[in-house]
Amino acid sequence: MELTVDRHSLRLFGIDLTGVPAYLREGWAEALQWPLLRWLTPAEPVRVLAADGTESVRPGVSARRIANPGRVRFVALALPEEILLRRSLVLPRLNDDEVRQAVELDVRSASPFPEDDTAWGYTVRRGERLQVDIAITSRRLIERQADASRPRLGGAEPEIWVDGDPPLVIAGYGEAARMAQSRRLRWVLFALLAVAGVLLGALAVTPTLQLRAQALEAVRKQEELARAVGSQVQMRDELAKVGEEVGLLAKVSGKRQDVVALIDEITRRLPDDTVLNRLEIAGSTVRIAGQADNAAQLLQALGAVAAFKEVRAPSGITRAPAGGKEGFAIEFRVGDEGKGR
């Protein structure tokens, strides 16, 4: 690999890299002239004052006229042909800096005016070869034309044009403000395009983000369900253990009571006016407490049941202050013969 660096050149593989920036600028400038990209450089309207006293408004540096331009901030003064010297050059394909150097050399050799009084402009038509049109004039003559047109300028600093298709711009006058405005508008368009690209990207990514959010939400709910079910599974396992223990106790107990059948039997024996507040079953002993319209009659009714043994009231019968019912507490035993009835 050959890499040579000095003050005057930068070469890589035998290629001079110092001209790369110029080539890139030239390519970018040429690309902006393509119809597809020309809209990226907005053409500011310019009021052109012709040498014959007529006026027209044109979009940028062009020969086309605009009927209703709206606001026009820039003005150009078109020079008469009698103070101009026109020339043409045919050049090979060069970059912008090389073309300017070639034109400047030709102007110096062809200008009839002193060097410090010479003003010139040129346009380039690109093809297989470069067609360069040049206009040369005197700065004193330009100032004279500007002074004569001062009432029509309205105090603005004019650009100096040489009319044609396209017109030539004499550099060094008021064209810098228009070109700066075009660059600002171009950057604004680039910024808007960037924002539009970001928004389109966001719109494209949004469905994916929504699906990701839904997937994360499903995973979260699954984890919550797993935690909730985990406690239920633990309770089921504990209940199974309790069931096993109850089964063992049932095998040990030879005379266990059928609680459901016993409660059903007690319920059928209680009158409709009875309110039961407590039911306690301890082995073969049953204790009930509550209120009835006639507690003594209830005690007799329970005592008449063959399955209920030793029916008694451990405490006395009391009458409630309100409602007229009597409070009772009754205790009795049940035997095997009381089951299933």
Image (cartoon, grey):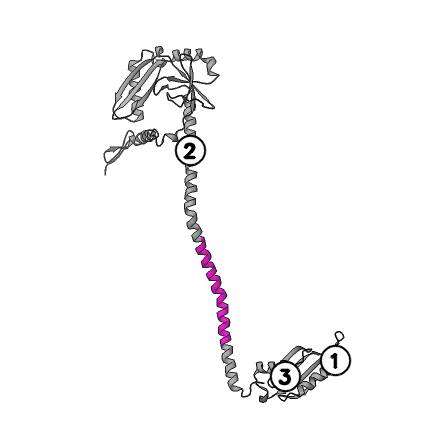
Closer to viewer: mark 1 or mark 2: 1
Label 3 neighbourhood size at 10 Å, few (<14), some (14-19), many (20+)?
some
The residue wearing badge 2 is 189
Q: Which mark is residue 318?
A: 1
Residue at left 36%, top 30%? 38
Q: Earlier in the sequence, mark 3 or mark 2?
A: 2
- Tell me whether the residue at label 1 lies in contact with that at label 3, contact meaning CB atoms closer than 8 angstroms: no
Label 2 neighbourhood size at 10 Å, few (<14), some (14-19), many (20+)?
some
53 or 296: nearer the eye? 296
Image quadrant occupied by the N terminus: top left
Which amino acid does the dot numbered 3 rest on?
Answer: Val
Q: Which mark is residue 286?
A: 3
Which amino acid does the dot numbered 2 rest on?
Answer: Leu
- Tell me whether the residue at label 1 lies in contact with that at label 2, contact meaning CB atoms closer than 8 angstroms: no
The location of residue 194, given as percent across then percent down, is 41, 38
Going by the image, does 263 lie left or right of 8?
Answer: right
* Residue 185: quadrant of the picture: top left
Whether residue 223 appears in magenta in the rendering, the answer is yes
Going by the image, does 5 lie left or right of 268?
Answer: left
Q: Earlier in the sequence, mark 1 or mark 3?
A: 3
Per the image, label 1 sits on a secondary structure element best described as: strand
Which amino acid does the dot numbered 1 rest on?
Answer: Thr
Residues in magenta, as a range: 213-240
Q: Earlier in the sequence, mark 1 or mark 2?
A: 2
The location of residue 141, given as percent across then percent down, is 39, 11
Q: CA distance from mark 1 to mark 2?
A: 98 Å
